[in-house]
Image (spheres, coloured by chain):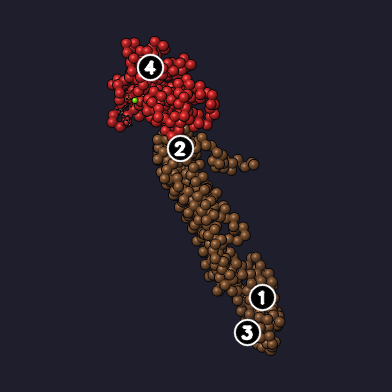
Amino acid sequence: MIAFENAAYNYGGGELLSEVSLRLAPGSFHFLTGPSGSGKTTFLKMAYAELMPTAGHVTIFDREVKSLSRDDIARTRRRIGVVHQDGQFLDHLPLATNVMLPLMVAERRGNAEDLGALLAWVGLKHLSDALPPSLSGGERQRAALARAIIMGPDVILADEPTGNVDWEMSLRLLTLLVELNRMGKTIVIATHDLNLIRQAKNQVPARVLRISKRRIQLAGADL
Amino acid sequence: MTLPPLLSRLADPFVALMVPDRQADRVVPPSGPTAWLTTFTAGAMTFLCVFALALSLASGRLADRWSDALARTATIRLSAPPQQMQAQTDAVLALLSTTPGIASARALTDEENRRLLEPWFGPDLPVQDLPLPRLIEVVEDGQGYDGEGLRQRLAAEAPGAILDDHTRWRRPLAEAAARLRLLGWLSIVLIGATMAAMITLAANASLAANAQVVKVLRLIGAQDSYIARAFVRRFTLRALTGSAAGALAGLAGVLLLPAADAAGGFLTGLGFSGAGWLWPFILPPLAALVAFAATRRAAFKKLKELT
Ligand SMILES: Nc1ncnc2c1ncn2[C@@H]1O[C@H](COP(=O)(O)OP(=O)(O)O)[C@@H](O)[C@H]1O
Ligand SMILES: [Mg+2]
């Protein structure tokens, strides 16, 4: 699905990530972990073509990202559901519209029943008309997840989806992601919450990628 | 309605614009202070445009009328001793009948001469006893004739004949009117360009103010054309509304010009006549088209800068 080959990223003050080589196989479940500021978000941004690698190659759905036109990038992103660390909602539109937005911009018809079912699935049906700024952290995370999957993407990238929610809510979100993985979606979750990773390992054969010293390596069973 | 493929492809984004798409519109938040700027600019520019049009069309009519009048007829004045008069008249008429560009020529009768002179000398003038020049009226055909060539041939065949083609004193007037028409059209082009520039600025400001919205839309897979459309539609509709108001105000202004009667001369003609009244109604769609093109161009450029 998504492959990195000797990829590196540099914001201008030296390489933040170097020699990243890995591939995310279809249907796989990965955690990406590392201290704050180690480059988890940066890695994910490369995986959905918001950032282009400053060295090496990133291939998304078998196409080298640097060869993609702006319209290609837009179309590629419709196949990748992203739960952004900071939500990225349109604050003037109600939650239900925000969740539907990917369908709208792709000019595809959604149907109200599916949307209702999706909102119910993430437990936000009663907040359909609420504006994003009025939502709690957990509600925002679940809304972001709903928006990430509304297009039926092949890949879901979640950036600290449990960042500012309590443990109970974290487990609910994890369960949602595990369910999606069982439907065949490729999942990557960036998190520094080791408890969450342990919990997940009881449910799915998840693999852990760890960022250390600018490299990304597969962590051993010990975490 | 079927359009040729190229035309329909060009028209497509413009047609799509008129189909209501409330959903897509809401994607961009209702905008702030730049909103009225476009409406106002389009209104003011169209208002000015109506007057520039009135001026252009009026001076165009004057130019046509004057050059028509001076082009179609000329007079040849023939002075000769009485016994040679008829021979020379025949010679001149023969010469004129073989001159290319002349439709007809005819010597005025004594009766006509008398009527021409009547206002000055009264009805009882004994025309036939006076050494009056013979007047020959020359009517030009569509092609026109070579005035200088004709003068030279007249000098050879009938030395007493003088060609008076009125052009000497009327040409500068006709030229001035034509120049005025050109200036009018130039003003219209400048007004259009100014409007395009102002709308481009407003569109850029609006896009920049909505940078965060644009970023989110790009992140969830919106193509530039989708985002641009939301802005383009808005600016086009604003320009259309403003321009319609400006056109109506301009028309009212022209209608309310005090009616100058025959003595008013030049001013009588200012305003619209006949099909000319349709022109101001073409301005709002034209302004919308200018806004459409300007915003679209600005949006695609700005979107590349923003994300
Ligand atoms: N746009 C940027 N410009 C410059 N530096 C940045 C930018 N974004 C992130 N960084 C830096 O890159 C490092 C990694 O950031 P990030 O990928 O967000 O880490 P993480 O998600 O693991 O916390 C941080 O030190 C951050 O300050
Ligand atoms: Mg981060």
Judged by depth in the image, the label closer to the viewer, 2 or 1, is 2
Task: Give yes or no for contact between labels 4 and 1 (Cβ–Cβ under 8 Å).
Answer: no
Q: Residue at x 54, y 26 (%)?
A: A111
- Mark 4 residue crowding within 10 angstroms, few (<14) / some (14–19) / many (20+): few
Residue positioned 41% across, 17% down in the render: A172
Tag 2 near tag 4, CB within 8 Å = no
Q: Secondary structure at mark 2?
A: loop
- Gap in Å between the C-alphas at discs 2 and 4? 36 Å
Q: How many marks?
A: 4
Q: Amino acid at mark 3?
A: Trp
The answer for how far apart the CA atoms under marks 3 and 2 are is: 79 Å
Q: Is mark 1 within 8 Å of ligand 1?
A: no
- Which of the 4 quarters of the picture holds residue A43? top left
Residue at figure coordinates x 45%, y 21% from the top left: A123
* Quadrant including the C terminus of chain B: top left
**Residue B90 falls in image quadrant:** bottom right
Single out the mark in the foreground, 3 or 1. 3
Camera-side residue of B223 and B97 = B223
The residue carrying mark 4 is A168
Disc 3 element: helix
- Chain given the colour red: A
Residue at the image point whose x is 52% and y is 31% from the top? A107
Amino acid type of the residue tagged 1 in the rendering: Glu
Disc 1: host chain = B
Question: Quick one: label 3 or label 2, which is nearer the N terminus?
Answer: 2
Q: In the rendered view, tell whether residue A198 sits above or below residue B115.
A: above
Q: Nearer the viewer, residue A137 or B218?
A: A137
> Label 3: which residue?
B120
Q: CA distance from mark 4 to mark 3?
A: 115 Å
Quick one: label 3, few (<14), some, or many (20+) residues within 10 Å? Answer: few
Q: Which residue is mark 1?
A: B137
